[in-house]
Image (spheres, rainbow, N blue to C red):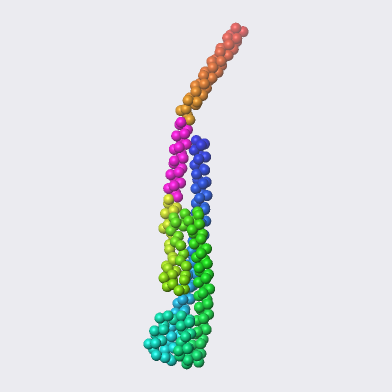
């Protein structure tokens, strides 16, 4: 019985350590993912501001030039392209609103560049940890995907950036359920194994021999006690 208890306790302790490590690894992956999602959201907000600002600059330019020509330039409304408007339409250089918006756009572009670098650094840190061993076992089990990098010249990377989000509740619940079943199964197996070993030991020749010798010794002791008792009884009767 003691062997069964020790075995079960050992398994419980080992599984507890494993579960604690899984929780710690999950929390680190989850924390890294949330940082990436937050930085991704900040980039999306800045990009929307840039689109709005570029639209306002285009609207100002429309008042100084051919409408269709400016609309065509809006397709690639980058900072360089918008700055080039002043070269095509010199009147814009004297427009204070245009100059002010261009300054805001330049500041915004610098901010986007810094945010992109920060985002990619966080993605690299997350991806390195996610792909390391043994963290990759937890990441794979809980379906933590690799974080996409943001390339300003690749529109596809921007769409991947926006889609990096997921709900872990279902995966975590599955892991907890499987851990419980694994614990129950391991405890049952150990209990059965220990009971089987106990039966084998009990039925072994050595144990049987020890039991026989014990019975013989007990019989001798009982016989000796009976004989001594009879001698004392007879001694008292003669006296």
Residue at image location 50% in from the left, 81% down from the top: 105
Residue 22 on the magenta segment? no
Residue at image location 43% in from the left, 50% down from the top: 178
Whether residue 67 appears in this view of the structure is yes
Q: Main secondary structure of the magenta part?
A: helix
Q: Is residue 100 above or below residue 3?
A: below
Nearest the viewer among 227 and 212 is 212
Rendering coords of residue 117 (x, y %):
52, 71
Rendering coords of residue 66 (x, y %):
39, 90
Nearest the viewer among 101 and 77 is 77
Residue at image location 58% in from the left, 11% down from the top: 231
Q: Quadrant of residue 153?
A: bottom left
Where is the C terminus found, in terms of image quarters?
top right
Q: Quadrant of residue 155?
A: bottom left
Considering every residue shown, the one lying at the far top of the view is 238
Whether residue 172 appears in this view of the structure is no
Residue at image location 44% in from the left, 72% down from the top: 154
Q: Is residue 205 above or below residue 44?
A: above
Q: Which residues are magenta?
A: 179-200
Residue 188 on the magenta segment? yes
Q: Is residue 131 above or below residue 159?
A: above
Rendering coords of residue 46 (x, y %):
48, 76
Nearest the viewer among 80 and 188 is 80
Rendering coords of residue 208 (x, y %):
48, 24
């Amino acid at each position: 019985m003691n062997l069964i208890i020790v075995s079960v306790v050992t398994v419980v302790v080992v599984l507890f350590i494993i579960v604690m490590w899984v929780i710690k690894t999950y929390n680190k992956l989850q924390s890294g993912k949330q940082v990436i999602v937050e930085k991704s959201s900040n980039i999306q907000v800045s990009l929307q501001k840039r689109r709005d600002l570029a639209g306002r600059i285009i609207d100002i330019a429309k008042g100084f030039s051919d409408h269709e020509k400016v609309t065509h330039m809006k397709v690639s409304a980058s900072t360089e392209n918008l700055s080039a408007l002043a070269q095509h339409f010199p009147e814009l250089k004297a427009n204070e609103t245009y100059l002010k918006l261009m300054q805001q756009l330049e500041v915004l572009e610098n901010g986007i560049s810094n945010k992109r670098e920060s985002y990619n650094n966080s993605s690299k840190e997350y991806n390195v940890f996610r792909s390391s061993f043994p963290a990759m076992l937890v990441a794979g089990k809980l379906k933590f995907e690799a974080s996409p990098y943001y390339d300003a010249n690749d529109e596809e990377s921007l769409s991947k950036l926006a889609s990096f989000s997921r709900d872990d509740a279902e995966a975590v619940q599955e892991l907890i359920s499987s851990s419980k079943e694994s614990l129950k199964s391991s405890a049952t197996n150990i209990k059965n194994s220990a009971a089987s070993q106990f039966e084998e030991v009990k039925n072994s020749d050595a144990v049987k021999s020890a039991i026989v010798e014990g019975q013989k010794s007990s019989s001798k002791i009982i016989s000796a006690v009976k004989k001594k008792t009879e001698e004392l009884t007879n001694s008292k009767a003669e006296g």
